[in-house]
Image (spheres, helix red, strand yellow):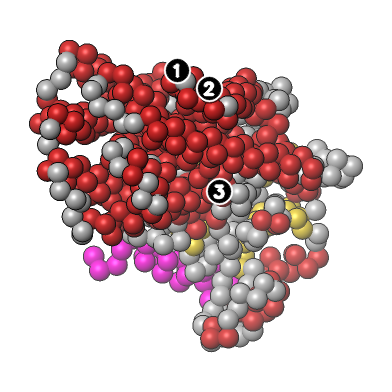
Amino acid sequence: MIEKALKGSSLYWGWIIFLLCLIGAGFMAYLYQLKVGLGITGMSRDISWGVYIAQFTYFVGVAAGGVMVVIPKYLHHYTKYAKIVVFGEFLAIAAVVMCLLFIVVDIGQPMRMLNVLLHPTPHSMLFYDMIVLNGYLLLNIICGYNTLLADKKGVPCPGWVKPFIYISIPWAISIHTVTAFLYAGLPGRHFWLTAIMAPRFLASAFAAGPALLIMILLFVRKVTKFDPGMDAIQTLAKTVCYAMIANLFFMGCEFFTAFYSQIPGHMHTLEYLFEGLDGYGNLVPFMRAAIVIGLFGIFLLLVPPIRRNTKWLAVAAASIFLSTWIDKGVGLVIGGFIPNPFDTITEYHPTFPEITIAAAIWGVGGLIVTILYKVAISVREEQARV
Amino acid sequence: MSMDRRKFLKAAGLTTLVGLGGKGLFELLKPGAVEAEMAEEGHGHHEEGEKNAGPKVRLAMLIDVMALNKEKIEKIVHTCHYLHNVPNWGDPKNEIKWIWEDEYEHVFTDSYNEYNHILEGLPFLLMCNHCDNPPCVRVCPVQATFKRPDGIVAQDYHRCIGCRFCMAACPYGSRSFNWLDPRVHLKIEMAEGRKLNKRFPTRMRGVVEKCNFCVERLAEGKQPGCVEAAPDVMFFGNLADPNSNVRKILRERISLRRKLELGTRPSVFYLI
């Protein structure tokens, strides 16, 4: 099947070359980082995780979001998703690969990475994260490949794949729960120390993943002969809307607990993120924008005539994706380190090589999605012809 | 080699406790010491089956805040950073520190009392608290940081993968990461007259480090470097032994510990 990725228009190849350039630039930057050390990034003693871990966290969500297509299809037999479920799975594959790469570039001694297997440590949440992420990658490869292969041959999906599909559902929940637990169990980091972290992660994941899927499917619909079906996309849009409302509701709960209790430790990070603290407020415009853009996206999705308009739907999906990205892919991780354990503030400024490396991993994700989608779409187009 | 580095360190640490504060090993193992410690902690983590589980040693550091001054702080910090070849990067971004000074407000963040005019303005020395319930050990995915039987929270620079989970988990900001190659900087410093301690390894970039309660000196029967640098300020001993030097002092002086509400049970005490 993979040979279908080798035949494409000049636009397709142009895009692939662009992604390869992005990846090449990032690879060079990574070699530089390997040689000199993580000191080339904006991270510091106080902000010890930055862009890499923040992006990792966000894309675990995108990966988990794929389950919002799998559940209706396999648990509720919602047949309108039959044609697009594989796109959800392929998006998850790309997102998980990105997550793993973000971890690799973040660690100081990548050549010792296998120590995690050599010295398995069940009391570390990172140990479970390794298991669930790699497991989820494998599950999606098994399920995605086999369902597409069956479609190509025009036969039903083989029975042995079914259990893997069912396992992938709670597994998707687990990847983002464990990722939330990386943060939510640390004493002394008040912003992260919240029982609502995992639920909120899942809510924003179920908004962000399907929102990205909508954007890609709308694009696919425009440039290829394959039509994912407007009904399916509309249903996805409703999922995004509900999930985003839940996400903002959870965020509101965080605000209530912090500001009604008036406990300084609980308020400080939120103050830093949304109005500035002790004269520091680099992220304030972004975090405020995230709220406004998120509410705007919800509004567009809530009004049926607007939602049914393809252009506005694309804007809405992009708004939700951007809003959740700023909130979780920037504010959540950086905010956790501000203020530091001494109640003082060090801000974070990502560097050019750091951003180049992160962009390259986006490029890898883009490349995987492009190739897998090209294969899937070619199969679908053939089906349409038959 | 049938014994790996970790086992060796553990064994070395325990056997050489003999030298601590002029106390014999038999004294540390005295009957009743374990039970007394358990009763004192009162956390109920003592299980029935453990009653005969052998000795319990818990090393602790007492810092006499009232006896500290600029000169002594400088001497302590310099001694420690010399002994452990800690580079002096001179900028907060790449900085590595094992022991350093800060103010009351920043040390006791959650219990800061702005009307405590006695503590205000006093110098506090910060270091790893060698917690009895260390979050860093809990989160480390490769057990590069681990708690020894004597209570020291140690760091294996050769196993650490540099994920910095421990830095996120430590509520005391005690851990430093080698963002750049410390050996490169040490060379620059040596050109400017800095001496290297050949008896302690330098680190490579990409690993986390922190105060180790001078395990390498304890193994030789010596006191920690900071104690030797300022014996009237720093007191080191076995918290589990009710008759130890540190327990005697704790019976007489008012002591503070950082962020007790987090349940980490720090082993560094500030004497007022």
Dominant SS in magenta: helix
**Residue A218 visible, this orientation:** yes
Circle 2 packing at 10 Å, graded few (<14), some (14-19), many (20+), is some
Question: Nearer the N terminus, badge 1 or badge 2?
Answer: 2
Q: Is residue B187 left or right of residue A378?
A: right
Q: Separation of disc 1 and disc 3 at Cα?
A: 31 Å
Q: Separation of disc 2 and disc 3 at Cα?
A: 29 Å
The amino acid type of the residue labelled 3 equals Pro
Q: Which residue is mark 3?
A: A199
The amino acid type of the residue labelled 1 equals Lys
**Residue B207 visible, this orientation:** no
| Disc 3, SS | helix
Q: Which residue is mark 2?
A: A306
Q: Separation of disc 1 and disc 2 at Cα?
A: 9 Å
Q: Are marks 1 and 2 on the same chain?
A: yes
Q: Which residue is mark 1?
A: A311
A238 relative to A132, above or below = above
Camera-side residue: A284 or A376?
Answer: A376
The amino acid type of the residue labelled 2 equals Ile
Residue B174 found in image quarter: top right
A108 relative to A307, above or below = below
A386 relative to A305, above or below = below
Q: What's the magenta region?
A: B1-26
